[in-house]
Amino acid sequence: MFRRSLAWQLFPAYLLITVAALLIITWYLSQLLPDFYHDQVADDLRARARLIEHQITPKLKEADYQEIDSVIKMLAISSATRITVILPTGQVIADSDEDPAKMENHGDRPEFKDALERGMGRSLRFSSTLGKRMMYVALPIAEQGRPLAVVRTSIPAVAMNENLRDIYSKVILSVVIVTVLAAGVSWAISRTISRPIDRMKEIAQKFASGQLDLRVPAPSQTELADLAEALNEMARQLQDRINTITRQRNELEAILSSMIEGVVAVDGRGHIVSINKAAAKFFGTNPDQAQGRNVEEVIRNTDFQEFIQGMLNEESPSQTDITLSGPEE
């Protein structure tokens, strides 16, 4: 089974959540930005139309259309905006880009109709005059409730699309930067969580090797601090028990070593667990080399081997007399 470190399990999860959130936000902005930007452009065009209204209203009252056309063409140079003035009948009397006398009647334009009916018109459509898509905003110029004309301002949709692409590029760049920063923060958080666990693992391995005097430092996280305390308590208890067992073993070895009687301890498989010096002398063997070996390998006496085997098969105490031959019988 493939296993990964805790940091590499946490890091992708944190990063995935962050990237998913950024993608959702980016998608939402991509849906919201065009409408928001178009509204901003429309507000700007409306403000320009209001400024133009104040400059041409006196000329409208005088029906000086030639002067109005001259003013409109001059204003368009400084504002980079196409400006058109249309009479309520749809007749174009001034235009910043074209000769109004050669322009067709604009009475069917949607922004013109909305301006007369609702007080403002706005549309994003293809201009048959210019041969490209344009954003139009139209406002009526009225006196005592009677419309004198409609002033219309517009800009090419191409310029708006370029601005939108620039905004999108900045948004994407911001998303990339935030993603990189999020990756760094996610990795730092993952390492902050996994580093104390790695330290605990190292010390636990040292506990297993017998270094029970070490202690696990308590991390700042409550759960990990509890785990560290549990490991430390386990190490303390193991050390106490090992010290107790060692002391008892030393006492037992001291007792067995001082006895003149031979004592041999054998486990259930017939391996020698312990043999004191007196027994080793009886059987002519080394006590250190005899431990852990099978009785038949160490003690070459058939009667003794049979006695041991019979004893292992019984639950009650057994006894027998055995003659050991050697220098002394």
Image: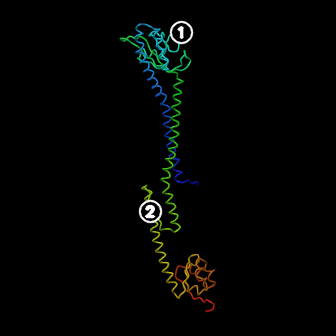
| Disc 2, SS | helix
Residue behind mark 1: 102
Q: Where does residue 159 sit, x and y in percent of width and height?
A: 53, 24
Q: Are marks 2 and 1 in contact (CB under 8 Å)?
A: no
Q: Where does residue 214 sit, x and y in percent of width and height?
A: 47, 66
In this rendering, the answer to whether 126 lies above or below 242 is above
Which is more toward the observer, 135 or 299?
Answer: 135
Which is more toward the observer, 50 or 321?
Answer: 50
Category of crowding for the residue at label 1, using alpha-carbon neighbours closer than 10 angstroms: few (below 14), some (14–19), many (at least 20): few
Amino acid type indicated by mark 2? Ala
In this rendering, the answer to whether 302 lies above or below 24 is below
Residue at image location 52% in from the left, 15% down from the top = 97
In this rendering, the answer to whether 80 lies above or below 229 is above
Residue at image location 48% in from the left, 30% down from the top = 33
Q: Of discs 2 and 1, which sits in the foreground? A: 1
- Rendered image coloring scheme: rainbow
Residue at image location 50% in from the left, 18% down from the top = 77
Mark 2–mark 1 Cα distance, whole angstroms, equals 93 Å
Which is more toward the observer, 26 or 177?
Answer: 177
Residue behind mark 2: 230
In this rendering, the answer to whether 160 lies above or below 174 is above
Q: Quadrant of the C terminus?
A: bottom right
Category of crowding for the residue at label 2, using alpha-carbon neighbours closer than 10 angstroms: few (below 14), some (14–19), many (at least 20): few
| Disc 1, SS | helix
Q: Quadrant of the N terminus?
A: bottom right
Counting the numbered discs, the total is: 2
The quadrant holding residue 145 is: top left
Amino acid type indicated by mark 1? Lys
Residue found at the far bottom of this picture:
328
Of mark 2 and mark 1, the one earlier in the sequence is 1
Q: Where does residue 48 sit, x and y in percent of width and height?
A: 44, 20
Which is more toward the observer, 275 or 270?
Answer: 275
